[in-house]
Amino acid sequence: MQQDAGQTNDATTALLSSRSIRHRHFVPILVGVAVMVGLVSGSLYGFGRYSLALKEQLEIGQLQVQRFGILLDSGNYIGHPLAGYVYDHYGPRVSCVGAAMVVFCGYGAIALALFHGNGNMISLALCNVGFFSVGFGSGLGYIAGL
């Protein structure tokens, strides 16, 4: 009996060591993804840096800029329950990829609004959707990082 326990223990140790060797090359990739999610997720706190330029570029008032900030925060906090659901059912990989895609699309909508708009309804609607999407994607990135 003692010998069987030793053999099982040796087999478990061999499996764990081969598994860690096999997954060791993924560590730099995972660290890179974690850093990128962290950078993407920090976008809520940088809003104050570009809000004045946004106001001047779109020729809008302070209330409309504040609405963008509110949408950014709302997307982040309202999206947490859905982000938790995605993380629980699909795992961190899908959450990270989803966060990156949503933030990319959100910033794409904002860039499109800035490129084509001067405060008209379409550019403001694109900015609304874009800022909500950036907030939502950041929230998804926060949940995946935790």
Image: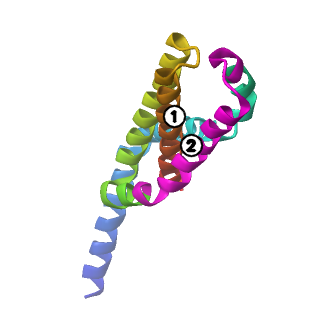
How many residues crowd around disc 2 within 10 Å: few (fewer than 14), some, or many (20 or more)? Answer: many
Q: Position of residue 54 (x, y in %)?
A: 67, 22
Q: Residue at x 36, y 64 (%)?
A: 13
* Viewer-nearest residue: 99 or 56: 56
Per the image, the residue denoted by label 2 is 71
Magenta-highlighted residues: 55-83
For residue 55, what is the image quadrant? top right
Q: Is residue 81 left or right of residue 5?
A: right
* Viewer-nearest residue: 77 or 70: 70
19 falls in the magenta region: no
Per the image, the residue denoted by label 1 is 128
Q: Is residue 57 left or right of residue 145?
A: right
For the residue marked with disc 2, what is the amino acid?
Leu
Q: Is residue 77 left or right of residue 21?
A: right
Magenta stretch: dominant secondary structure: helix
82 falls in the magenta region: yes
* Viewer-nearest residue: 132 or 145: 132
The N terminus, quarter of image: bottom left
